[in-house]
Image (cartoon, coloured by chain):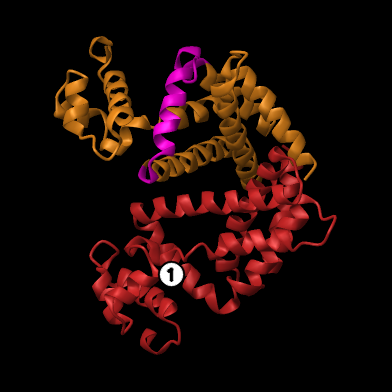
Chain colours: A red, B orange
Amino acid sequence: MARWQPHASERLVAAALELFEEQGYEKTTVIEIAERAGLTKSTFFRHFRDKREVLFGRGTVAGLLADGIGAAPAGAGPLDAVAHALDVIGEQVFTPDRREFGARRSAVIAANPELREREALKELGLTAAMTDALKRRGFADLTARVAAELGALACTVAYERWRHAADRDDFGDVARRTLREVQAASASC
Amino acid sequence: MARWQPHASERLVAAALELFEEQGYEKTTVIEIAERAGLTKSTFFRHFRDKREVLFGRGTVAGLLADGIGAAPAGAGPLDAVAHALDVIGEQVFTPDRREFGARRSAVIAANPELREREALKELGLTAAMTDALKRRGFADLTARVAAELGALACTVAYERWRHAADRDDFGDVARRTLREVQAASASC
């Protein structure tokens, strides 16, 4: 099925996820992933640095978060700018058709320490990207770091809720509600 | 010099840090670390799972943070409990004689992607340990997660400041000041 999707990168990700589910991350080789996707090993390496990278994109989310913060309306507070960025993620990454993929991807990552480690590093990258984008908007260093941490937490919690939500809400809606709750919780700390 | 320190674990850490500085993390083997410490390879593996683990202790900081939160006075708010835990870290881990070691360790980690990755995972572990300890004190899930993130950020920023501080303040004092600043910044987000 993965074979007929239009883009090489997406086909490789879908093939990798299938194989990791079927036979485990450890036992799967890059060659098998490429074959399942109907592509060659060299195509794989044009898209991903290694097997571990295939579930983590190429910095897309970090870039979109930074762009989203940069594109927030003038005068937006730090968490308003973060909310704007989370809307962008809902429109361009965590779209409704990705909900099932997200659940499968999370299950594979949770089962493997190497993948959990890579994910931890990627999460730090998201926070760093948001911090830099907030500083470019003129917020003080510590304000930017705090808003980025709260934003990253809201994003993580919203993603958990969105994947499991019975009500099929859009990610952007779930994320805005979650961000307000995070803000209220931080005020009560 | 490392050879004559009293504890095997500390001797191994000191030897590893020296070798990583002298010839790089990649080129250093576990056997070389053990030899420099005047110990055997099997002693190394009784203390650390692998070469990467040698700069990251064995969950001590996470355990101390959790214990410190648990031992905070009854009625402490979430960030008061975190402040209490940071005091414990200042008394038992980031003691004045560790300041120079901390700076050297950070430089070695910054120079190697594998070590940065392990550190990212350890940091997530610290946040998770604080979150669990705060939930055991009865705080709601999201409140506990927010307080743990703010506490982890305060800990990171305080560690950076403490390592570079000209005034030689104790870690606990730096951490309490930083935590108040983080709290003020989150209120202004």
Can the viewer see residue B71? Answer: no
Identify the residue shown where x is 24% and y is 9%: B4
Task: Inspect the magenta stretch and tell me whether residue B104 lies in it.
Answer: yes
Task: Inspect the magenta stretch and tell me whether residue B158 lies in it.
Answer: no
**Circle 1: element type:** helix
Instruction: Indicate the quadrant where residue A24 lies.
Output: bottom left
Q: Is residue A71 left or right of residue A124?
A: right
Q: Nearer the viewer, residue B139 or A100?
A: A100
Question: Residue A75, percent across and down?
Answer: 85, 55
Amino acid of disc 1:
Arg
Question: Residue A179, percent across and down?
Answer: 71, 55
* Furthest residue toward front: B22
Above or below: residue A95 compared with residue B165: below
Identify the residue shown where x is 53% and y is 40%: B127
In the rendered view of the protein, which quadrant contains the N terminus of chain B? top left
Above or below: residue B47 compared with residue B37: below
In the rendered view of the protein, which quadrant contains the C terminus of chain B? top right
Instruction: Indicate the quadrant where residue B108 lies.
Output: top left
Magenta stretch, residue numbers? B91-114
Q: Is residue A73 left or right of residue A60?
A: right
Question: Residue B167, percent across and down?
Answer: 62, 13
Can the viewer see residue B9? Answer: yes
Q: Is residue B130 left or right of residue A13?
A: right
Chain at numbered mark 1: A
The residue tagged 1 is A104
- Dot 1: few (<14), some (14–19), or many (≥20) neighbours within 10 Å? some
